[in-house]
């Protein structure tokens, strides 16, 4: 076979690209893996505080966002969280479960990258890193890619370049440019798993910067019970990152500051602690600064014994669904992933192949499939990469 001709060229050495290349290579395909970064798996290395939240025991299709909510089912069912765990175990990588089914390495995320590199080596995958792709063309059934001063060719091309989240790691929108060039539709990308910003009257909550509390966040039909964190710009923390994927400009989010409390708890407090004020009652179950800020906005001065039952019931309702109106997000720079991307309508859910361009595939974050916080997006990377690697 000619030196610059391969069976498949994979663009992007992140999680999906590494998995795809390793899978195809171990099936006997001659694979070239390209990336402009000098080393593979840069997002993997920083994930999970450097310990890589590599999957989640709760992976299910309904925990992924897409214009087609059924698209992810095929790949996720054929390469499950247990399949990836088995691979991790085979390499002797110690791991542990944190809250909500999240799995992390006991040691370093580098172990996952090294594992995937070894898997690529087992498939004789050739890696060419540290140079940008300068051109991509397609003619006579072959894709031609200019990279690092040479032009390489293959009948299969895999777009695994991710989305524009975390640009400091070199993330770009090249996946969308390539998709459009080949006639594939792109769902408008937006930041996901990202802090939300507040302005106007709600900006007064900036005085709570650094305060965290266990809450339930809601937006539309989506709801998450985790911690929220007030910042100098707005709202963050796992509960906010989760709900941000469902938020659009102009929409409100609701926060239940007391999810443990049964309806009628404030009226019960009026009977049990009549001499206490609202702030004191709130401070029993949340940080003092948050209790003070909420009590001030509820505007119920004096003892609860002096408050009308109707006013206390209204306060209770507001505390259970406190509306916030974000004016934006902290953008792709702070977003962990991207919502939107290459439209699934143009792809096969079984192989990740483009329906109208033979030999073209798209995997991972480049595709309009976005998981919840907590290892879901890595599982999509492994599953979609595997699906394409098995089809090439």
Image (cartoon, rainbow, N blue to C red):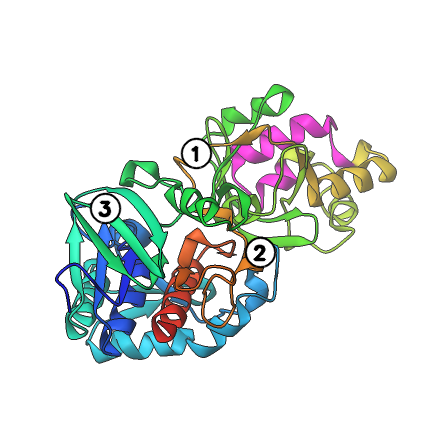
State the separation of the CA atoms marked 3 and 1: 48 Å
| Residue 53 visible from this viewpoint | no
* Rendered location of residue 167, percent (x, y): 33, 37
**Which of disc 3 and disc 2 is earlier in sequence?**
2
Q: What element carries label 1?
A: loop
**Residue 266 in which image quadrant:** top right
Callout in the foreground (1, 2): 2
122 left or right of 222 in image: left
Q: Name the residue under label 2.
A: 66
Q: Return the disc, 1 or 2, that comes first in the chain's sequence.
A: 2
Q: What stretch is highlighted in magenta?
A: 280-304
The question of residue 296 being in magenta is answered with yes
In primary-sequence order, the first of circles 3 and 1 is 3
Crowd class of label 3 (few under 14; some 14 to 19; many from 20; radius 10 Å):
some
Q: Where is residue 27 in the image (x, y as percent from the top left)?
A: 26, 79
* Quadrant of image for the N terminus: bottom left
Q: Is residue 126 left or right of residue 304?
A: left
The residue indicated by pointer 1 is 210
Residue 219 is covered by the magenta coloring: no
Label 2 secondary element: loop
- Above or below: residue 327 compared with residue 389: above
Q: Position of residue 369 (x, y in %)?
A: 51, 57
Give the main secondary structure, helix, strand or loop, of the magenta stretch.
helix
Residue at 68% over, 27% down: 297
Residue at 18% across, 67% down:
125
Name the secondary structure under disc 3.
Answer: strand
Q: Which of 179 and 385 is in front in this view?
A: 179
Is 355 situated left or right of 266 in this image? left
Residue annotated with mark 3: 146
Looking at the image, which is closer to me, 240 or 89? 89
């Amino acid at each position: 076979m000619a030196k610059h001709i391969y069976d498949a060229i994979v663009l992007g050495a992140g999680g999906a690209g590494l998995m795809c290349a390793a899978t195809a290579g171990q099936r006997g395909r001659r694979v070239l893996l390209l990336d402009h970064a000098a080393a593979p798996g840069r997002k993997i290395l920083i994930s999970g505080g450097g310990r890589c939240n590599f999957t989640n025991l709760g992976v299910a299709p309904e925990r992924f966002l897409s214009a087609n909510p059924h698209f992810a089912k095929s790949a996720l069912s054929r390469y499950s969280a247990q399949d990836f765990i088995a691979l991790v175990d085979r390499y002797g990588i110690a791991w542990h479960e944190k809250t909500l089914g999240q799995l992390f390495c006991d040691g370093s995320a580098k172990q996952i990258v090294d594992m995937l590199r070894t898997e690529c080596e087992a498939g004789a995958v050739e890696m060419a890193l540290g140079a940008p792709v300068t051109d991509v063309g397609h003619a006579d059934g072959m894709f031609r890619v200019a990279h690092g001063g040479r032009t390489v060719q293959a009948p299969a091309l895999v777009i695994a370049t991710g989305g524009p989240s975390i640009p400091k790691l070199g993330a770009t929108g090249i996946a969308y440019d390539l998709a459009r060039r080949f006639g594939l539709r792109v769902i408008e990308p937006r930041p996901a798993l990202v802090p939300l910003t507040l302005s106007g009257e709600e900006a007064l909550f900036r005085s709570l910067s650094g305060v965290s509390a266990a809450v339930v966040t809601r937006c539309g039909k989506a709801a998450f019970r985790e911690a929220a964190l007030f910042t100098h710009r707005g709202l963050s923390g796992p509960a906010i990152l989760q709900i941000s994927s469902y938020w659009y400009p102009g929409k409100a989010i609701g926060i239940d500051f007391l999810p443990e409390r049964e309806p009628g708890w404030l009226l019960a407090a009026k009977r049990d602690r009549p001499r206490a004020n609202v702030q004191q009652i709130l401070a029993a179950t949340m940080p003092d600064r948050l209790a003070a800020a909420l009590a001030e906005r509820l505007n119920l001065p004096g003892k609860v014994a002096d408050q009308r039952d109707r006013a206390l019931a209204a306060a209770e309702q507001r505390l259970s669904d406190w509306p916030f109106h974000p004016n934006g997000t902290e953008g792709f720079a702070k977003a962990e992933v991207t919502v939107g991307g290459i439209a699934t309508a143009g792809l096969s859910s079984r192989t990740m192949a483009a329906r109208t361009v033979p030999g073209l595939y798209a995997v991972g974050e480049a595709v309009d499939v976005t998981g919840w916080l907590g290892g879901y997006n890595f599982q999509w990377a492994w599953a979609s990469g595997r699906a394409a690697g098995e089809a090439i």
